[in-house]
Structures are given as structure tokens and as C-alpha cells.
Amino acid sequence: MKTVLLLAVLSFLMVQPALAQDEKVTLGQRGDNAIALGVNEGTATIGYWHKLSGSDDLGVDFGIQYRDHETFNNQTYQVMPAIKHYLFPEKSFSPYLYGGLIASYGNNDTRETTQQSGSRTESYTAGALGGLGMEWFPIRNLSIGGHVGVRAQYEYNKTTYSSSNFVVPPPNKDEGFTIGTFNSGIRLNLSF
């Protein structure tokens, strides 16, 4: 997968028009749409962004994480609609304000083979994100950037248990609010 992504990015870069040595690329010179690719803490994201004005982008990112080990299987899916407001869209290094929503679903299955037991935890999350970011436009239709900020979210978790040898306890439910920080990781934006 990494090889395919690298080849796609390199192919995209090779067909870009050449720029003069002293020409700086700005937000206004890129296309109206962008595909965003990112990796953050083991979660791969892909998104679609549309330029609303000279300084505002509206988009949505999708994230997925999948881990399968001998004793557990974990999956997380998330969707994050958001808006970016660029503070200096005429610059090739452009800071921006970031605001968005997040919704996610995840499950974690654990297996204990010697005891023939296990559990399944399902998690639901909904919240809001706000922060600051920076984006660099080294060539006309490519930018590299990321953002950091504060996340406030509601979480609901439900755990069910299974066993063929023991009495199974009733499901366990947990819910509450979390406030913390977040970061987007490194993001590559391909504009068209």
C-alpha cells in the first residue's frame, strides 16, 4: 500500500508545470478541490476538500485503524467534517484556523484461548475540534501541512463477555465526556 501511494504521489509531481526559480506558490494558485492523505498515530486518513473562497476550505476526512493480533482484534472508523480558514492565503507558508466535528465507532475483541473466553467492547464517540494549522505550498498543486488543537467529545462504551467455562458477567456500560488535545499528523494535499 505504501509503495502504491508513493508511486501515485511521484507521478502526480512529475506532471506538474515547472515554476520559475523565484515564483512562490500561494493558496489562490492551487485548484479548487484537494485530496488529503495523512497518517497519525497508526490511523490512516483520506479526505476531500473544496475551496469555498480565497481563504476558506470545507472538507471531510475519513479515518480507519485496524489491528489484528493473537489475543485481540481492534477496528476504529471515524469521519471528521471541518473548515479551514487561512490567515495569509497569499503566502506560500500559510497558517490557518481549524474547526470541525468528529464521529467515530470502534470495537475491540479480546480472546483468551486457554480459558475459552473473551470480550467485545464497542465505542461510540461524537465531539468537536478546534485548533491551528500550517500549510506549505512547495509546488502549484501540492501542499504539506498539519494542525493541532483541542478536542471535546462524548464517549459511550459497552463491553459484553463470553465464556464456555465460566459464568458470564452482565454487560458493562460506560459513558462520559473527554477534553484533550489532538493533532492531524503530517498531511499531504493534492489539489486539482
Image (cartoon, rainbow, N blue to C red):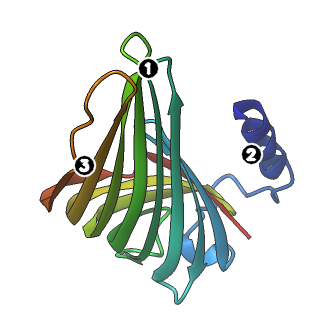
What residue is shown with label 2? Answer: 9
What residue is shown with label 3? Answer: 171
Q: Amino acid at mark 2?
A: Val
Local crowd at mark 1 within 10 Å, few (<14), some, or many (≥20)?
A: few
Q: In the rendered image, which quarter contains the C terminus?
A: bottom right
Question: Which of marks 3 and 2 precedes in the sequence?
Answer: 2
Q: Amino acid at mark 1?
A: Thr
Q: Secondary structure at mark 2?
A: helix
Q: Is residue 47 above or below residue 187?
A: below
Q: In the rendered image, which quarter contains the N terminus?
A: top right
Mark 1 vs mark 3: in front: 3
- Tell me: 147 left or right of 77: left
What residue is shown with label 1? Answer: 71
What numbered label is drawn on residue 46?
none
Distance (Cα) linking label 2 and label 3: 47 Å
Mark 2 vs mark 3: in front: 3
* Residue 115, position as x, y percentages in the image: 36, 15
Residue 85 sits in quarter: bottom left
Distance (Cα) linking label 2 and label 1: 36 Å
Q: Secondary structure at mark 1?
A: loop
